[in-house]
Amino acid sequence: MKKCVSQSTDTNVKLYNDLTDQLMPYFFREDYLGEKRYFDSLRVHDDDLYIEEKTKAHNELFNHPEKFCNLYIDSTKNKNTYFWTHNTEVYLRRIKRTKDSFKDFSNNPDIKNLSIRSSIKANQFNLCTAKVLDLVEYDKHTNECEIGVVYFSEIVFDPSKRRALVFVDHRIKNYFHRNAVFELRLNNDNYWEIEDSMLVSTS
């Protein structure tokens, strides 16, 4: 699949953009493809054909704004993330215990940033597969195709500033909701690539 590498000179903005570029095909389901998601049922019968059709639909959508569905950023509704509304310390201990790669962050004083919601706004995103709007715009676009509502935590960087953790929460209306912690690494192509993840909850 084609990648949309953010050209932002702001490290945080670039990371959120690169992360969201990958979340589109792998975490936000097929909704971002709009009418092209017809092939979802192929997953049950033929994995190879499913991947082939999904990649084709993704690449046809890439850089064609007239085909984009809407992704809404919720950065103002609450200052905290799902981590804060439940027991932050329990979740942090679970992260450290469950994922070996996450243990490198266990003594990082910024680890609690995962419980603080990012204030990034829609106009700081420049994606190649979706139109990004602030949540306050939601009621103006009820008849348009929707990818859902997402919010991010603040970023936890390691000392090298080349690895990071981010908490992501995604929901589509009242029928789909999940969140996870993602580990990213800045690769040699200057792209923040997802290296690992841990699903926190789903419903």
Image (spheres, rainbow, N blue to C red):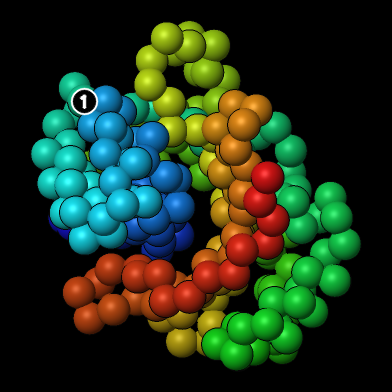
Give me the residue at 50% from left, 18% from top. Answer: 137
Residue 123: x and y in percent read 39, 34
Residue 132: x and y in percent read 39, 33
Give me the residue at 43% from left, 26% from top. Answer: 146
Above or below, comparing residue 104 to residue 72 in the picture: below
Report which quarter residue 34 is drawn in: top left
Report which quarter residue 7 is drawn in: bottom left
Amino acid at the residue labelled 1: Lys
Report which quarter residue 141 is drawn in: top left
Which quarter of the figure is the C terminus placed in?
top right
Label 1 crowd bin: few (<14), some (14–19), many (20+), radius 10 Å: some
Above or below, comparing residue 196 to residue 122 in the picture: below
Q: Is residue 136 left or right of residue 36?
A: right
Which of 40 and 131 lies nearest the eye of the viewer? 40
- Which residue position holds label 1? 67
Residue 84: x and y in percent read 81, 55
Q: Is residue 200 left or right of residue 8?
A: right
Give me the residue at 44% from left, 73% from top. Answer: 184
